[in-house]
Image (spheres, grey):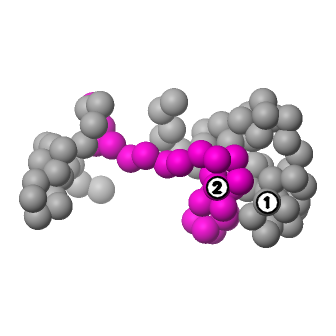
């Protein structure tokens, strides 16, 4: 699945949790969070800490992968720099 913003990610995680038949409380208990924290992540992910995301991924036995835009896999040189086309646009 292509995720381009925090809301899409939170919807995906919520749907995956529901697909597995797991409650917010059950997910929270697995990784030492409160049910309210899971609820807030699912409704307002832009206000949550990154650590919360990784805890939820762990509870659902998921992992996060990052790749260069427009490619199937990222390629790196020996020094660890991305060999894909460099960002050429200004923020």
- Residue shown at 58% from the left, 65% from the top: 50
Rendered-image quadrant of the C terminus:
bottom left
The answer to which of marks 2 and 1 sits earlier in the sequence is 1
Res 80 seen here: yes
Tell me if residue 72 comes above or below residue 49 in the rendering: above
Q: Is residue 81 left or right of residue 15?
A: left
Instruction: Please indicate whether residue 12 sits to the left or right of residue 19 in the image.
Output: left
Residue 69, magenta (yes or no): yes
Disc 2 target residue: 58
Relative image position of residue 12 (x, y in whole percent): 65, 37
Q: Identify the residue at horizontal 66%, vertical 61% (top origin).
A: 55
Q: Is residue 6 left or right of residue 45?
A: left
Q: Secondary structure at mark 1?
A: helix
Stretch of the chain drawn in magenta: 45-70
* Residue depicted at x 86% and y 66%: 34
Q: Nearer the viewer, residue 12 or 5?
A: 12
The quadrant in which residue 56 appears is bottom right
Find residue 41 and report its horizontal and vertical position in percent. 73, 55
| Residue for point 85% across, 62% down | 29
Residue 10 in view (yes/no): no
Q: Position of residue 1 (x, y in %)?
A: 51, 30
Helix, strand or loop for disc 2 = helix
- When the figure is inspected, residue 60 is found, relative to residue 72, above or below; the finding is below
Residue 77 screen position, x and y as percent: 10, 54
The disc label shown at residue 30, or none: 1
Label ID, residue 53: none
Where is residue 38, by image quadrant? Answer: bottom right
Q: Is residue 90 left or right of residue 22?
A: left
Q: Residues within 10 Å of mark 1 (few under 14, many from 20)?
A: few
């Amino acid at each position: 699945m292509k995720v381009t913003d925090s809301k899409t990610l939170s919807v995906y995680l919520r749907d995956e949790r529901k697909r597995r038949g797991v409650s917010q409380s059950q997910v929270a208990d697995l990784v030492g969070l409160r049910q309210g924290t899971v609820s807030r992540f699912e409704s307002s992910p832009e206000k949550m800490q990154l650590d919360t995301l990784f805890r939820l991924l762990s509870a659902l036995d998921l992992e996060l992968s990052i790749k260069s835009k427009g490619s199937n896999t990222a390629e790196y040189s020996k020094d660890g720099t991305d060999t894909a086309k460099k960002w050429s646009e200004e923020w």
